[in-house]
Image: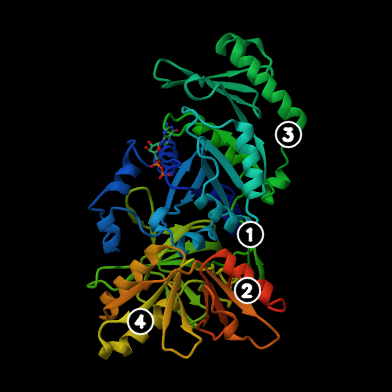
Amino acid sequence: MSKTIAEELKKEVDKRRTFAIISHPDAGKTTLTEKLLLFGGAIREAGSVKARKASKHATSDWMEIEKQRGISVTSSVMQFDYKGHRINILDTPGHQDFSEDTYRTLTAADSAVMLIDVAKGVEAQTVKLFQVCAKRGIPIFTFINKLDREGRSPFDLMEELEEVLGIRSVPMNWPIGTGRDLCGVYDRVHNQVELFQGNDHSEIEVRKVDGYEDPIIREMAGEFLHDQLCQDLELLDVAGDPFDLEKVKRGELTPVFFGSAINNFGVQTFLENFLELAPKPTPRNSTAGMIDPLEDEKFSGYIFKIQANMNPAHRDRIAFMRICSGKFQRGMSVRHVRAGKEIKLAQPQQFLAQDRDIVQEAFPGDIIGLFDPGIFRIGDSLSQGSDVVFDELPTFSPEIFAKVTVKNALKHKQYQKGIDQLTEEGTIQVFQSASGFDETILGVVGQLQFEVFEYRMKGEYGVDIQLHRMTYQFARWIVDENKIDPGKFRINSQLVTDKKGNYVVLFENEYAMRTAMDKNPTAKFLETAP
Ligand code: GDP
């Protein structure tokens, strides 16, 4: 690689951090994101992100549903600069907006920030998102939020991380008091205390100290809280895990930070520690081996999400691409490997807190939105001058199912076309009854996917469909050397086939699934397609 290009790439890669915030709704993700953006100067007022979240008239005309609900339906990206770093935050929507996109977005992140409410601990959606990150083995940083409220003890929460998520933790700071008594945190890494000042805690004073036993802390926090702090930290010193960067990098140990996003307490320290410890853009595996952003000069990237325009007058879509290597320049020609042709990337968009900008150049770790006239699919690889294909994106086990029927039988052809295209795009998974009936069943991970499917079938294919929710909760692909006997999957379950003809069983509950496993000892039950 030529020296100047290598230098430019190294400089740009070194300063980038691309991560996702994973949490359960209400833990404070919007609030934390906003504080981070404020530090970076990407937004000027508190409330901007919230406003976007709540706005009934978002400027985006991509998605009707997005407008109607005033939320960002599919995960998007925010970029800002902070002290020489360029930060990309990938948004992972929660609640009813949850979909397979949420999971796939995590593949574009190099690390994750797990946000936990101090009173609620590890919640259901956090578990799901954590598992996707854990499978990839990416580093996970934990921020325990809402420390200004009464909550659970830090030790209790650490134990829960281990028990529920199976990850060990190492507190980087420790609260001095909690809830109404919270007066600050002790920073174990930098040997300093950060204390709330003023009646409304709006000022934060940072003092260097000589270890946690330093009498200065006693003076500031009082005898009672200082004794408690010393007791806790002694215990941690003796019984806690030591900080080990290699384990953090492998996702075996999570650094834990305590704070309160709404009071901006502990947020800046968290950000600075995070930037120091979090990985810069990491290599990605491909048919040409590992593509390392520091070694591969040629541009490459892959599409991890496609956002359709819900406005029928504008069929265009936005394909989100993670850049894996090289320098992206507006208007450049790249090879669309699956299609086997060169394409010009003419109107790339980059995502800031408020507006979308046309991007002139971008580097590994960055996410850009490509105008998509219908040529991209999830998982497509784009590269300069070669046929690099990145590893396939993972698929996820559907958890919500519905039978689909078309209201007007004459539209059957368009209906079939819609189903084929939308499954290929990764919008939904489709199954056929294995019992000989002509019955189509859709499977998704989030309710929103059904709504999007219904909307697009009407908007893009002119087909009115009806969805009949089913009571199944699990899908397992079965692989068996012996012949699969449909008769064995009747009680609280149903045998179906996927698009490729693989056998899948849908189960109403865990008990039915366990029973079927016991009855079919030679079969393997897989969460996703083999
Ligand atoms: P999201 O659903 O995860 O995006 O959560 P939000 O950021 O919208 O926050 C949910 C609620 O928690 C809001 O009412 C916030 O004002 C509140 N909240 C966020 N951070 C804190 C915090 O540090 N302390 C307290 N007491 N409330 C917080």
Give the crowd class for mark 3: few <14, some 14-19, many >=20 residues within 10 Å.
some
Give the crowd class for mark 2: few <14, some 14-19, many >=20 residues within 10 Å.
many
Foreground: disc 2 or disc 4: 2
Residue 516, which numbered label?
2
Is 262 situated above or below 2?
A: above
Looking at the figure, which quarter contains the C terminus? bottom right
Q: Are the residues at dot 4 and dot 1 in contact (C-beta closer than 8 Å)?
A: no
Amino acid type, label 2: Ala
Give the camera-side residue of 195 and 465: 465
Residue 418, which numbered label?
4
Give the camera-side residue of 180 and 259: 180
Expressed as whole percent of the image width and height from the top left, the position of residue 400 reads 45, 67
Amino acid type, label 4: Gly
Give the SS element for disc 4: helix
Q: Are the residues at dot 2 and dot 3 in contact (C-beta closer than 8 Å)?
A: no
> Along the polypeptide, which appears first: circle 3 or circle 1?
1
Give the crowd class for mark 4: few <14, some 14-19, many >=20 residues within 10 Å.
many
Residue located 41% across and 70% down the image:
345
Give the SS element for disc 1: helix
Residue 135, which numbered label?
1
> Along the polypeptide, which appears first: circle 1 or circle 2?
1
Expressed as whole percent of the image width and height from the top left, the position of residue 35 reads 42, 37
Is 351 situated above or below 429?
A: above
Amino acid type, label 1: Lys
Q: Which residue is mark 3?
A: 240
Query: Looking at the image, in which quadrant does ligand 1 appear?
Result: top left
Residue located 66% across and 72% down the image:
517
Residue projecting furthest to the front? 491
Amino acid type, label 3: Gly
